Image (tube, coloured by chain):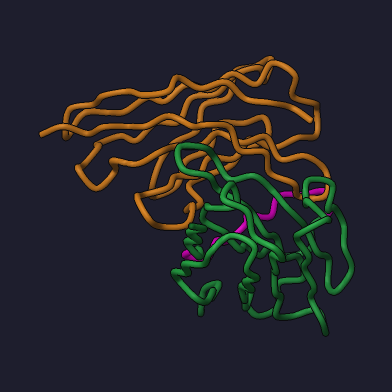
């Protein structure tokens, strides 16, 4: 099962774009990349997912490199409420998620 | 649409006692998951159900943990007897059919267990 590597923490100024990187060099061709976030004392919340193409929704954009070995989650205009732990996950067959330790994003005023 | 419901939200027990957690998934979701999240770590999958059958329980400590999903809807996770290292948040999640494809998991608020 593919594992992911993320920096333990990042800072971002309020109103700026937050770019969160993730390495998943052992990803297989049919495995999806998912991003979740977890705000303190809550369950993880789905953000976005993708397979090969870049994806965008109302929350974020997901950029996946052509070789699919890494991806970047972009929050275009970070707010204080975006302070959370962000998890990059490679979904295996049978919909199994393997969470790493994630990136703690600190959005500062 | 109602989300994943879990109860209780908090539980404090002494070591060697028993405890049970309950989860009600989103209506129509065939797949149900139980995760354990120790403070400072990401969630770790304990068991995955497809309807009322177990798909994966490879990381469930079966000497003390058990889980069931009777009738393919609600599920209970039990710990008997509890150890200090079982202190964690227990998360329940559900999704549509859990085979290949893109089905996001929806998480409940979790049950915070403290073993003293």
Image height of A99 relative to B31, above or below: above
User: Where does residue B10 sit, x and y in percent of width and height?
Assistant: 44, 69
Range drawn in magenta: B99-109
Quick one: which chain is orange?
A: A
Q: Residue at x 44, y 44 (%)?
A: A37
**Residue at far left of view:** A109
Identify the image quadrant of residue A109. top left
Image height of B49 relative to B58, above or below: below
Image height of A10 relative to B13, above or below: above
User: Where does residue B55 sit, x and y in percent of width and height?
Assistant: 87, 57
Q: Residue at x 47, y 53 (%)?
A: A45
> Chain B's colour?
green
Q: Is residue B109 left or right of residue B58?
A: left
Does the magenta run of residues contain B100?
A: yes
Q: How many marks?
A: 0
**Residue at far bottom of view:** B71
Most frequent secondary structure within the magenta stretch:
loop
Q: Is residue A42 left or right of residue B113?
A: left
Image height of B76 relative to B59, above or below: below
Does the magenta run of residues contain B80?
A: no
Q: Is residue A24 left or right of residue A36?
A: right
Q: Nearer the viewer, residue A40 or A69?
A: A40
Q: Residue at x 16, y 32 (%)?
A: A108
Identify the image quadrant of residue A100. top right
């Amino acid at each position: 099962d593919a594992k992911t590597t993320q920096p333990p923490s990042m800072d971002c100024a309020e109103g700026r774009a937050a770019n969160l990187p993730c390495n998943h060099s052992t990803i297989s061709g049919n495995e999806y990349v998912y991003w979740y976030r977890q705000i303190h004392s809550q369950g993880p919340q789905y953000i976005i997912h993708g397979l090969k193409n870049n994806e965008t929704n109302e929350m974020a954009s997901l950029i996946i490199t052509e070789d699919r070995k890494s991806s970047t989650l972009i929050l275009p205009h970070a707010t204080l409420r975006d302070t959370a732990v962000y998890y990059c996950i490679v979904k295996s067959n049978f919909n199994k998620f393997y969470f790493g330790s994630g990136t703690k994003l600190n959005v500062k005023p | 649409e109602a989300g994943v419901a879990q109860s209780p939200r908090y539980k404090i027990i002494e070591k060697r006692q028993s405890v049970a957690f309950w989860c009600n998934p989103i209506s129509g979701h065939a797949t149900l998951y139980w995760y354990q999240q120790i403070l400072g770590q990401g969630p770790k999958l304990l068991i995955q159900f497809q309807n009322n059958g177990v798909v994966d329980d490879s990381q469930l400590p079966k000497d003390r943990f058990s889980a069931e999903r009777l009738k393919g809807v609600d599920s209970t996770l039990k710990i008997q007897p509890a150890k200090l290292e079982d202190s964690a948040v227990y998360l329940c999640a559900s999704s549509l059919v859990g085979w290949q494809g893109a089905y996001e998991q929806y998480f409940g608020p979790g049950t915070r267990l403290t073993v003293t």
